[in-house]
Amino acid sequence: MSTMSTQTATPELRLWILEQAQAGHSPDAVLQAMQQSGWDEDVALAALEQTLEDFLASRVHPSPQPSVPAQPAQTAQRPPAVPVPEPDLAQSPATLRLPDGQVVRVVVSMRDPRVVVFADLLTDEECVALRQLAAPRLARSETVDNTTGGSEVNAARTSAGMFFGRGETALIARIEQRIAALLRWPVENGEGLQVLHYRPGAEYKPHYDYFDPAQPGSATILQRGGQRVGTLVVYLNTPEAGGGTIFPDVQLEVAPVQGHAVFFSYDCAHPGTRSLHGGAPVIAGEKWVATKWLRERRFD
Protein backbone atom coordinates (compact mmCIF):
# COMPACT_ATOMS: atom_id res chain seq x y z
CA MET A 1 0.00 0.00 0.00
CA SER A 2 1.45 3.38 -0.98
CA THR A 3 2.00 5.93 1.79
CA MET A 4 2.74 8.81 -0.56
CA SER A 5 -0.19 10.80 0.79
CA THR A 6 1.34 10.90 4.28
CA GLN A 7 5.07 10.93 3.57
CA THR A 8 7.03 14.15 3.14
CA ALA A 9 10.69 14.53 2.18
CA THR A 10 12.07 16.22 5.30
CA PRO A 11 15.25 18.35 5.50
CA GLU A 12 16.85 15.50 7.47
CA LEU A 13 16.08 13.06 4.66
CA ARG A 14 17.55 15.38 2.03
CA LEU A 15 20.67 15.85 4.16
CA TRP A 16 21.03 12.09 4.52
CA ILE A 17 20.70 11.64 0.72
CA LEU A 18 23.44 14.21 0.17
CA GLU A 19 25.72 12.51 2.73
CA GLN A 20 25.27 9.16 1.00
CA ALA A 21 26.05 10.65 -2.42
CA GLN A 22 29.15 12.39 -1.08
CA ALA A 23 30.26 9.10 0.47
CA GLY A 24 30.27 7.51 -2.98
CA HIS A 25 27.03 5.51 -2.89
CA SER A 26 25.23 5.26 -6.23
CA PRO A 27 21.76 6.78 -6.66
CA ASP A 28 20.32 3.28 -7.14
CA ALA A 29 21.84 2.13 -3.82
CA VAL A 30 20.52 5.22 -2.00
CA LEU A 31 17.04 4.71 -3.49
CA GLN A 32 17.06 1.05 -2.46
CA ALA A 33 18.06 1.96 1.10
CA MET A 34 15.23 4.48 1.32
CA GLN A 35 12.67 1.94 0.10
CA GLN A 36 13.98 -0.64 2.59
CA SER A 37 13.48 2.00 5.27
CA GLY A 38 9.79 2.26 4.35
CA TRP A 39 9.78 5.27 2.04
CA ASP A 40 7.32 5.18 -0.85
CA GLU A 41 9.18 4.74 -4.15
CA ASP A 42 7.72 7.88 -5.74
CA VAL A 43 8.48 10.06 -2.70
CA ALA A 44 11.98 8.61 -2.40
CA LEU A 45 12.77 9.06 -6.08
CA ALA A 46 11.50 12.65 -6.14
CA ALA A 47 13.51 13.53 -3.02
CA LEU A 48 16.62 11.90 -4.45
CA GLU A 49 16.37 13.67 -7.80
CA GLN A 50 15.58 17.08 -6.31
CA THR A 51 18.35 16.88 -3.71
CA LEU A 52 21.00 15.93 -6.25
CA GLU A 53 19.78 18.55 -8.74
CA ASP A 54 19.91 21.28 -6.07
CA PHE A 55 23.39 20.20 -5.01
CA LEU A 56 24.72 20.23 -8.58
CA ALA A 57 23.13 23.61 -9.19
CA SER A 58 24.78 25.02 -6.08
CA ARG A 59 28.15 23.85 -7.37
CA VAL A 60 27.64 25.64 -10.69
CA HIS A 61 25.95 28.77 -9.24
CA PRO A 62 27.14 29.14 -5.64
CA SER A 63 24.69 30.85 -3.34
CA PRO A 64 25.10 32.14 0.21
CA GLN A 65 21.98 30.15 1.13
CA PRO A 66 22.40 26.38 1.64
CA SER A 67 20.57 24.29 -0.97
CA VAL A 68 19.81 21.52 1.55
CA PRO A 69 18.35 22.66 4.88
CA ALA A 70 20.01 20.99 7.85
CA GLN A 71 20.13 21.16 11.59
CA PRO A 72 23.33 22.91 12.75
CA ALA A 73 24.60 19.97 14.81
CA GLN A 74 24.13 17.66 11.84
CA THR A 75 26.64 19.58 9.70
CA ALA A 76 29.03 20.87 12.37
CA GLN A 77 32.45 19.42 12.99
CA ARG A 78 32.26 16.12 14.84
CA PRO A 79 32.44 16.72 18.62
CA PRO A 80 34.94 14.91 20.85
CA ALA A 81 33.99 11.31 21.66
CA VAL A 82 32.68 10.41 25.10
CA PRO A 83 32.68 7.02 26.89
CA VAL A 84 29.93 4.67 25.78
CA PRO A 85 28.51 1.34 26.99
CA GLU A 86 30.46 -1.63 25.68
CA PRO A 87 29.93 -5.39 26.19
CA ASP A 88 32.97 -7.48 27.07
CA LEU A 89 33.84 -8.76 23.61
CA ALA A 90 37.61 -8.22 23.62
CA GLN A 91 38.28 -11.95 23.26
CA SER A 92 35.51 -12.45 20.67
CA PRO A 93 33.44 -14.78 22.87
CA ALA A 94 30.57 -16.75 21.39
CA THR A 95 28.62 -16.49 24.64
CA LEU A 96 28.50 -14.28 27.71
CA ARG A 97 27.39 -15.65 31.08
CA LEU A 98 25.78 -12.88 33.12
CA PRO A 99 25.67 -12.65 36.94
CA ASP A 100 22.06 -13.85 37.12
CA GLY A 101 22.98 -17.03 35.21
CA GLN A 102 21.56 -16.01 31.84
CA VAL A 103 23.78 -17.18 28.95
CA VAL A 104 23.63 -14.72 26.05
CA ARG A 105 24.94 -15.62 22.60
CA VAL A 106 26.83 -13.11 20.46
CA VAL A 107 25.41 -13.31 16.92
CA VAL A 108 26.93 -10.28 15.16
CA SER A 109 29.53 -7.73 16.21
CA MET A 110 30.19 -4.70 13.97
CA ARG A 111 32.74 -2.03 14.86
CA ASP A 112 31.77 0.93 12.65
CA PRO A 113 29.05 1.67 13.43
CA ARG A 114 29.14 -0.15 16.77
CA VAL A 115 26.32 -2.68 16.45
CA VAL A 116 26.06 -5.96 18.36
CA VAL A 117 23.28 -8.52 17.99
CA PHE A 118 22.61 -10.84 20.94
CA ALA A 119 20.49 -13.98 21.19
CA ASP A 120 18.70 -15.23 24.30
CA LEU A 121 18.92 -12.00 26.28
CA LEU A 122 15.39 -12.65 27.57
CA THR A 123 13.61 -15.94 28.06
CA ASP A 124 10.29 -16.67 26.35
CA GLU A 125 8.56 -16.37 29.72
CA GLU A 126 10.08 -12.93 30.34
CA CYS A 127 9.01 -11.74 26.87
CA VAL A 128 5.43 -12.85 27.46
CA ALA A 129 5.37 -11.27 30.93
CA LEU A 130 6.62 -7.93 29.61
CA ARG A 131 4.00 -7.86 26.88
CA GLN A 132 1.25 -8.64 29.37
CA LEU A 133 2.43 -5.94 31.81
CA ALA A 134 2.67 -3.32 29.07
CA ALA A 135 -0.51 -4.03 27.09
CA PRO A 136 -3.02 -2.23 29.37
CA ARG A 137 -0.91 0.94 29.40
CA LEU A 138 -0.23 1.36 25.67
CA ALA A 139 -0.88 4.72 23.98
CA ARG A 140 0.14 6.28 20.65
CA SER A 141 3.93 6.61 20.65
CA GLU A 142 5.46 10.06 20.80
CA THR A 143 8.88 11.46 19.93
CA VAL A 144 10.97 14.16 21.60
CA ASP A 145 10.04 17.71 20.57
CA ASN A 146 13.43 19.33 20.02
CA THR A 147 11.89 22.80 20.19
CA THR A 148 10.42 22.54 23.68
CA GLY A 149 12.11 19.49 25.20
CA GLY A 150 8.72 17.84 25.61
CA SER A 151 7.15 15.11 23.48
CA GLU A 152 4.77 15.02 20.54
CA VAL A 153 2.96 12.62 18.22
CA ASN A 154 5.01 12.25 15.03
CA ALA A 155 3.83 10.78 11.71
CA ALA A 156 7.20 9.03 11.35
CA ARG A 157 6.43 6.84 14.37
CA THR A 158 3.29 4.74 14.03
CA SER A 159 3.50 2.43 17.03
CA ALA A 160 1.86 2.36 20.46
CA GLY A 161 4.02 2.40 23.54
CA MET A 162 4.49 2.95 27.27
CA PHE A 163 7.30 3.45 29.80
CA PHE A 164 8.03 1.49 32.96
CA GLY A 165 9.61 3.30 35.87
CA ARG A 166 13.13 2.10 36.58
CA GLY A 167 12.86 -0.90 38.93
CA GLU A 168 9.05 -0.63 38.86
CA THR A 169 8.54 -4.40 39.34
CA ALA A 170 10.78 -7.32 40.21
CA LEU A 171 10.76 -8.40 36.55
CA ILE A 172 11.76 -4.92 35.33
CA ALA A 173 14.51 -4.66 37.94
CA ARG A 174 15.90 -8.08 36.95
CA ILE A 175 15.97 -7.19 33.27
CA GLU A 176 17.61 -3.82 33.97
CA GLN A 177 20.31 -5.45 36.08
CA ARG A 178 20.95 -7.96 33.29
CA ILE A 179 21.26 -5.21 30.70
CA ALA A 180 23.61 -3.24 32.96
CA ALA A 181 25.85 -6.30 33.37
CA LEU A 182 25.79 -7.09 29.64
CA LEU A 183 26.69 -3.56 28.53
CA ARG A 184 28.84 -2.69 31.57
CA TRP A 185 26.89 0.51 32.18
CA PRO A 186 25.26 1.55 35.48
CA VAL A 187 21.56 0.83 35.96
CA GLU A 188 21.04 4.41 37.16
CA ASN A 189 22.33 5.75 33.82
CA GLY A 190 19.44 4.14 31.97
CA GLU A 191 16.08 5.63 31.08
CA GLY A 192 12.98 3.67 32.01
CA LEU A 193 12.32 0.62 29.86
CA GLN A 194 9.96 1.43 26.99
CA VAL A 195 7.72 -1.20 25.39
CA LEU A 196 6.40 -0.62 21.86
CA HIS A 197 3.72 -2.46 19.89
CA TYR A 198 3.65 -2.32 16.08
CA ARG A 199 0.65 -3.56 14.08
CA PRO A 200 0.81 -4.42 10.35
CA GLY A 201 2.09 -1.41 8.41
CA ALA A 202 3.44 0.34 11.51
CA GLU A 203 7.02 1.55 11.41
CA TYR A 204 9.54 4.06 12.75
CA LYS A 205 11.37 5.89 9.99
CA PRO A 206 15.19 6.29 10.16
CA HIS A 207 16.32 8.67 12.88
CA TYR A 208 19.05 9.28 15.46
CA ASP A 209 18.53 8.62 19.16
CA TYR A 210 20.88 11.34 20.42
CA PHE A 211 19.58 14.84 21.11
CA ASP A 212 20.71 17.62 18.77
CA PRO A 213 22.47 20.18 21.04
CA ALA A 214 21.61 22.97 18.59
CA GLN A 215 17.87 22.55 19.13
CA PRO A 216 16.32 24.88 21.73
CA GLY A 217 14.65 22.09 23.69
CA SER A 218 17.80 19.98 24.08
CA ALA A 219 19.22 21.97 26.99
CA THR A 220 16.24 20.98 29.12
CA ILE A 221 16.49 17.33 28.07
CA LEU A 222 20.25 17.11 28.70
CA GLN A 223 19.89 18.35 32.28
CA ARG A 224 18.61 14.89 33.17
CA GLY A 225 21.50 12.51 32.68
CA GLY A 226 23.29 14.19 29.81
CA GLN A 227 23.36 12.88 26.26
CA ARG A 228 22.15 9.49 25.12
CA VAL A 229 25.14 7.29 24.25
CA GLY A 230 23.64 3.87 23.54
CA THR A 231 20.46 2.01 22.65
CA LEU A 232 19.37 -1.59 23.26
CA VAL A 233 16.29 -2.91 21.43
CA VAL A 234 14.96 -6.24 22.69
CA TYR A 235 12.46 -8.20 20.58
CA LEU A 236 9.54 -9.50 22.64
CA ASN A 237 8.04 -11.62 19.84
CA THR A 238 8.81 -12.75 16.28
CA PRO A 239 6.62 -11.08 13.63
CA GLU A 240 5.40 -13.18 10.70
CA ALA A 241 7.15 -10.85 8.25
CA GLY A 242 8.90 -7.50 8.29
CA GLY A 243 9.63 -5.32 11.31
CA GLY A 244 13.43 -5.54 11.23
CA THR A 245 15.73 -2.91 12.69
CA ILE A 246 17.50 -1.18 9.82
CA PHE A 247 20.77 0.77 9.66
CA PRO A 248 20.63 2.55 6.27
CA ASP A 249 24.20 3.90 6.39
CA VAL A 250 25.62 0.37 6.30
CA GLN A 251 22.77 -1.50 4.57
CA LEU A 252 22.19 -3.67 7.65
CA GLU A 253 18.87 -5.16 8.73
CA VAL A 254 18.51 -7.07 12.01
CA ALA A 255 15.68 -9.60 12.01
CA PRO A 256 13.31 -9.37 15.00
CA VAL A 257 13.47 -12.69 16.87
CA GLN A 258 11.85 -13.20 20.26
CA GLY A 259 14.39 -12.89 23.08
CA HIS A 260 17.09 -11.45 20.81
CA ALA A 261 18.39 -7.88 21.02
CA VAL A 262 20.39 -5.36 19.02
CA PHE A 263 22.70 -2.88 20.74
CA PHE A 264 24.32 0.16 19.16
CA SER A 265 26.28 3.08 20.60
CA TYR A 266 27.12 6.60 19.45
CA ASP A 267 29.98 8.48 21.10
CA CYS A 268 28.81 11.96 20.04
CA ALA A 269 25.78 13.73 18.62
CA HIS A 270 26.81 13.61 14.98
CA PRO A 271 25.82 11.65 11.83
CA GLY A 272 29.43 10.49 11.62
CA THR A 273 28.55 7.87 14.22
CA ARG A 274 26.49 6.22 11.45
CA SER A 275 23.87 5.39 14.07
CA LEU A 276 20.97 6.26 11.78
CA HIS A 277 18.40 3.51 12.30
CA GLY A 278 14.72 2.75 12.01
CA GLY A 279 12.03 0.14 12.44
CA ALA A 280 11.01 -1.31 9.06
CA PRO A 281 7.25 -1.68 8.47
CA VAL A 282 5.61 -4.79 9.84
CA ILE A 283 4.35 -6.74 6.84
CA ALA A 284 2.40 -9.49 8.60
CA GLY A 285 1.60 -10.18 12.22
CA GLU A 286 2.68 -7.77 14.94
CA LYS A 287 5.91 -6.69 16.61
CA TRP A 288 6.67 -6.06 20.27
CA VAL A 289 9.97 -4.54 21.40
CA ALA A 290 11.46 -3.19 24.61
CA THR A 291 13.91 -0.31 24.28
CA LYS A 292 16.50 0.83 26.82
CA TRP A 293 18.23 4.16 26.20
CA LEU A 294 21.48 4.78 28.05
CA ARG A 295 22.71 8.21 29.18
CA GLU A 296 26.14 9.64 29.98
CA ARG A 297 25.28 10.14 33.65
CA ARG A 298 22.67 9.20 36.22
CA PHE A 299 19.17 9.68 34.82
CA ASP A 300 16.52 10.80 37.32
Image (tube, rainbow, N blue to C red):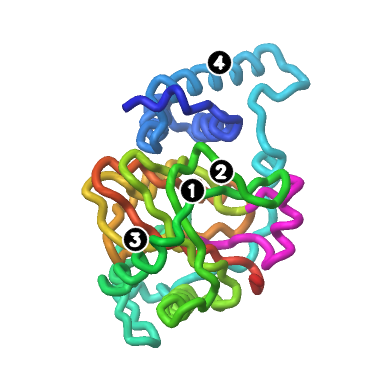
Q: Which residue is mark 4?
A: 53
Task: Find residue 234 and report its horizontal and vertical position in percent.
Answer: 38, 63
Residue flagged by tag 1: what amino acid is it? Arg
Local secondary structure at mark 3: strand
Q: Is residue 31 left or right of residue 125?
A: right
Q: Quadrant of the C terminus?
A: bottom right
Residue located 39% across and 35% down the image = 38
Q: Which residue is mark 2?
A: 153
Labels 2, 4: front one: 2
Residue located 27% across and 40% down the image = 283
Task: Find residue 125 and report its horizontal and vertical position in percent.
Answer: 27, 74
N-terminal-most mark, 3 or 2: 2
Q: How far apart, in angstroms, are the residues tagged by discs 2 and 1?
A: 7 Å
Residue flagged by tag 3: what amino acid is it? Tyr
Task: Find residue 12 and report its horizontal and vertical position in percent.
Answer: 58, 35
The image's mark for residue 140 is 1
Q: Which residue is mark 3?
A: 235
Residue located 36% across and 31% down the image = 32
Labelled pair 2, 1 in contact (Cβ < 8 Å):
yes
N-terminal-most mark, 1 or 4: 4
Q: Is residue 151 left or right of residue 42?
A: right
